[in-house]
Image (spheres, helix red, strand yellow):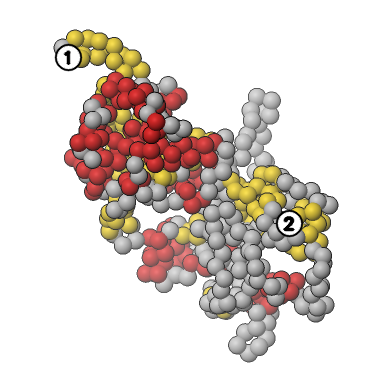
Amino acid sequence: MAREFKMPDVGEGLTEAEILKWYVQPGDSVEDGQVVCEVETAKAAVELPIPYDGVVRELLFPEGTTVDVGQVIISVDVAGEEPAPAAAEPEAAEAEAPSGRQPVLVGYGVAESSTKRRARKGANGVEASVSEAEPGAVPTLPQALEQPRAGGTPLAPAEQLPTAAVNGNGNGTAALERPLAKPPVRKLAKDLGVDLATVIPSSADGIITREDVHAAVAPAPEAPVSAPAPVPAAAPASYDSVRETRIPIKGVRKATAQAMVNSKFTAPHVTEFVTIDVTRTMKLVEELKGDKDMAGLRVNPLLLISKALLVAIKRNPEVNAAWDEANQEIVQKHYVNLGIAAATPRGLIVPNIKDAQAKTLPELASALGELVSTAREGKTSPAAMQGGTVTITNVGVFGVDTGTPILNPGESAILAVGAIKLQPWVHKGKVKPRQVTTLALSFDHRLVDGELGSKVLADVAAILERPKRLITWA
């Protein structure tokens, strides 16, 4: 019989993924756990393993196609399995399949559960009951419509759920799921008595905004006495394909663009600068490269800059915090997940080193090396990019002196490091060539006032000017 493998549930509100590359073709044999394709979500590029043995019958989508979660992407002929009863629906047959390895994206797990999801009411008060299904699978619209009501009869076509209650994004094609909205918007909807499942988002990404909620409770406009004359459809925009190239915004680039806009216009940014002499730090870097305890590790200025920032945070712990808009609270973190901005062919990503404050210098060097190499290979997992608290971006590798970095969403501060180069500098009363760089610290002024931000930046600068403070201050 043929088994169908669906695009797994990527979690965290992500509803689609682009197929980057197929590793198998029709006729190829596959084994349980074998990677069959690579996909890109808004978070990262990940590989998908097949959960059973068999022979590939068909690839349902070509490379470069964006596929909704729950859609079948590959079918496999599986030997030795009995076909489903003729009267059973395909979805029901699949739900009765033996439990075992479940298709999941790298970095995500699927919990085994026999519970049923609660019923959801649409705008017309009809309950849409989602029946028990295979873990990781997404019920389809026909399934939801075929669920019996209290009286035991299925929903009639006239009683079908509104589009917004089906998918939460108004496209009418995705499976039943929780509407996409941020906590403040959910709270607003609750206060106004609005069911988010009935709200149609106005944005292209399907996320419900405050304006959408207010529009849902606004009175409907009165019908005009006479319908206006139809407006002819505008002709599609044309452009010079020889002199212009248009690149679709999707995947990591689309997610990054939206996140940066949200961060810039949500968190009040403040940026401070300091130019310092890092000659002693550069000498220490060279000494550490020859230290046997650091053999085989990635030793560079970024390592000591990272350590300097961690020490500065230890001396000023209030800077390591987050803003909880829904509860109107400042959440102070007692751990540091240190983000490192990395430019990749698919766009900017910010993986982070978990509990960086607890690592020794060799451990920090090892973590930095692994983080950078994984990012360059495009193998960074979504989990590695979640939960960051502060970030470092090294614009100096591009020969740039400094910049005004934008906060990674949900974080309190980001340190930009400029190019390190020889410049004339007054040292011990004389002008000498010294290794000089400029640091820029952007911070969220709701969390960090000017005094605290200045202290953090000054501490980082002081350590890099005299790196022995890594010992005396730590």
Above/below status of 161 relative to 17: below
Q: Residue 467's spot in the image, x, y percent?
A: 26, 29
Mark 2 closeness class: few <14, some 14–19, many ≥20 residues within 10 Å: some
Above/below status of 313 relative to 104: above
Q: Residue 418's spot in the image, x, y percent?
A: 36, 26
Q: Which numbered dot is residue 260?
A: none
Q: Residue 402's spot in the image, x, y percent?
A: 35, 26
On the image, numbered disc 1 is attached to which residue?
428
On the image, numbered disc 2 is attached to which residue?
31
Q: Nearer the viewer, residue 292 or 159?
A: 292
Quarter of the rendering occupied by the N terminus? bottom right
The picture quadrant where one finds residue 366 is top left
Q: Residue 453's spot in the image, x, y percent?
A: 24, 39
Q: What residue is shown at x 38% (from left), y 64% (from top)?
A: 188
- Which element type, helix, strand or loop, lies under badge 1? loop
Q: Nearer the viewer, residue 199 or 297?
A: 297
